[in-house]
Image: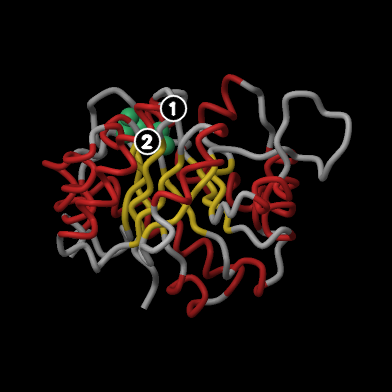
């Protein structure tokens, strides 16, 4: 069975002390409650990665994720953090191609493909994001666009490499807006993504691939979204900053 994952993307939020408190609360709640159905991945800003893992070392179902990594292996790239450095801090997952990176930092498909390669070469697992704007959806371009993002970012990978990849579908119009994709919209796109993956890697590989939904996931809409047959969990922004809310989302995975 494919992995179910609830990943918390803190984005550029929380100072050290706040981060320590949030992680400790999440660890305690996950420990005490039945959340066996999903893996939890916490993705704080870079400086938190140094201490975060120590707070949940003994917790088998909690993993550490980074929100980004460099598209170069090492060297004179001031301000960047390589996949190798992340690996040395025991990071497990790396979010790649979040729409905020694509839009604000002009990350191209080519840059993202390089990041995917470096992530895998360093033994880390990519969470590869795709998503369309409202304008693109209204123009009926969304299906083609998502297929192109997947093809350009991932389809150079071997089947063995691809088996490590997690996909996150995040419609940009649903991110931070309070507007969630309807269950039908999420399921429709997730099924299309799986079909597109199957066209390259075969049915079995596509069936094994974890596809997360992201965009205004909250404790009160998570269960419905996760009940969609092709939705394998969530990539959660704002709601991952509150321990109770986030753990309730984890518990919504049945
Ligand atoms: P929100 O959950 O705040 O809408 O953010 C979604 C997201 O971008 C997660 O990566």
Q: Is residue 175 visible?
A: no
Mark 2 surroundings: few (<14), some (14-19) or many (≥20) residues within 10 A: some
Residue at 50 percent across and 35 percent down: it is 48
The residue carrying mark 2 has its beta carbon less than 8 Å from ligand 1: no
Q: Is 147 positioned to the left or the right of 72 in the image?
A: left
Image-quarter location of ligand 1: top left
Residue at 30 percent across and 36 percent down: it is 22
Residue sitting at the far left = 220
Tell me: residue 80, above or below residue 158: above
Locate the N terminus and report the quarter of the image it occupies: bottom left
Marks 2 & 1, CB-CB < 8 Å contact: yes
Residue at 73 percent across and 30 percent down: it is 80
Q: How many marks?
A: 2
Q: Which residue is mark 2?
A: 20
Q: Is 67 positioned to the left or the right of 89 in the image?
A: left
Residue sitting at the far top = 104
**Residue 16: which disc?**
1
Give 24 or 172, whichever is nearer the viewer: 24
Give 108 or 251, whichever is nearer the viewer: 251
């Amino acid at each position: 069975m494919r992995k179910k994952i609830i990943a918390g993307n803190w984005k550029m939020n929380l100072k050290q002390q706040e981060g320590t408190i949030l992680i400790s609360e999440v660890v305690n709640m996950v420990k005490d409650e039945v959340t066996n159905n999903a893996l939890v991945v916490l993705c704080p800003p870079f400086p938190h990665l140094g201490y975060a893992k120590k707070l949940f070392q003994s917790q088998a179902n909690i993993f550490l994720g980074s929100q980004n990594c460099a598209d170069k292996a090492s060297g004179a790239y001031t301000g960047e953090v390589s996949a190798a450095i992340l690996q040395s801090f025991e990071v497990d997952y790396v979010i790649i191609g979040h729409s905020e990176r694509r839009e604000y930092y002009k990350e191209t498909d080519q840059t993202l493909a390089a990041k995917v390669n470096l992530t895998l070469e360093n033994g880390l697992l990519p969470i590869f994001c795709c998503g369309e704007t409202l304008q693109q959806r209204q123009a009926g371009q969304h299906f083609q666009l998502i297929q192109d993002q997947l093809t350009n970012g991932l389809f150079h990978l071997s089947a063995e490499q691809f088996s490590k990849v997690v996909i996150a579908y995040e419609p940009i119009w649903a991110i931070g807006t309070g507007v969630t994709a309807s269950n039908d919209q999420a399921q429709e796109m997730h099924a299309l993504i799986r079909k597109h993956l199957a066209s390259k890697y075969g049915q079995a590989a596509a069936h094994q691939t974890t596809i997360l939904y992201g965009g205004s996931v909250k404790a009160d809409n998570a269960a419905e979204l996760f009940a969609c047959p092709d939705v394998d969990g969530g990539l959660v922004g704002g709601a991952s900053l509150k321990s109770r809310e986030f753990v309730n989302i984890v518990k919504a995975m049945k």
